[in-house]
Amino acid sequence: MFFSFNMFDHPIPRVFQNRFSTQYRCFSVSMLAGPNDRSDVEKGGKIIMPPSALDQLSRLNITYPMLFKLTNKNSDRMTHCGVLEFVADEGICYLPHWMMQNLLLEEGGLVQVESVNLQVATYSKFQPQSPDFLDITNPKAVLENALRNFACLTTGDVIAINYNEKIYELRVMETKPDKAVSIIECDMNVDFDAPLGYKEPERQAQHEESTVSVIPSVLCSPAFSGSGNRLDGKKKGVEPSPSPIKPGDIKRGIPNYEFKLGKITFIRNSRPLVKKVEEDEAGGRFVAFSGEGQSLRKKGRKP
């Protein structure tokens, strides 16, 4: 006679039966053996797992794309990622360097890998970790191109993107509709926060003065201060050149306390006209065109 019993009051949910969960020793991509350069793994948010993981995942009824939750139980830090290839050695997985920094993992540390289902992202907000990110002409286009190598985003992570042979770090400040979202084939709105350490340029206060300031250097050496000559030799009323003004003689004007908005008042200083200089009738002065002409023909009437 056979007896069967269930130690649980309710059946085990299917989602727990089909969940992939295991531990691996993690290493950075630079430790990956092989002739090919795998620097492309550093530019994204995907990891490399062993072939046995693919065998276990194929037997489970999991949803695609494959997304995983990485947890460092020693530091209680977690993040999410996708998978790029299944070519790692057994018991080992390879992570991008920025992901190991987020998890506070060292080379050879243990990491818990679990399969998860994430909602599709609709909104995300990033904060550059350096003001140098502002030097990029079109940061949204650069970020959109870099996120093609990522599978998901987690709030609080500091991701790294490569642009023009320079690494830019951005902190994920906010994601919607959840703290961890999938960004594969999604229409996501992207926003930026002020870069870390950024200071807005100080604007100098412009003080408007009611009186026009006079530059002493211009008054001390006025332009066109010489006297002119006429072709006919006459001297008409010519104002003498003004005497130079010393900087100490300049006095600030009195503000117009009767100023009204929308009304402009022009104040001109009236000076008495200088009397015209009388013509000098003394002999010996130069008179233009004062000579006499000669004619070849004698003047007089014909006989």
Image (tube, helix red, strand yellow):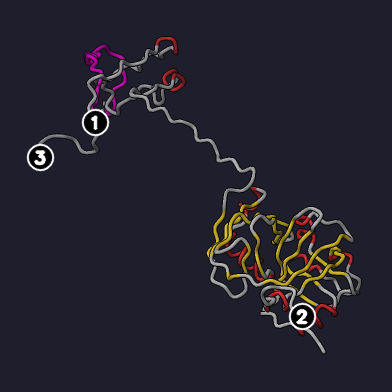
Q: Is residue 244 above or below residue 178?
A: above
Residues drawn in magenta? 262-289
Q: CA distance from mark 1 to mark 3?
A: 85 Å
- Neighbor class of circle 3 (other Cα within 10 Å; few <14, some 14-19, many 20+) is few
| Label whose residue precedes the other's in the sequence (1 or 2) | 2
Q: Secondary structure at mark 2?
A: helix
Q: Residue at x 59, y 70 (%)?
A: 119
Q: Residue at x 36, y 15 (%)?
A: 252
Q: Which residue is mark 3?
A: 302
Residue 170 found in image quarter: bottom right
Residue sticking out furthest to the front:
1
- Judge whether residue 5 can be spotted in this image: yes
Q: Is residue 83 above or below residue 3?
A: above
Residue sticking out furthest to the bottom:
1
Q: Residue at x 82, y 77 (%)?
A: 53
Q: Which residue is mark 1?
A: 261
Residue type at mark 1 is Leu
Which circle marks residue 40 in the picture? none
Q: Secondary structure at mark 3?
A: loop
Which circle marks residue 57 in the picture? 2
Camera-nearest residue between 245 and 36? 36
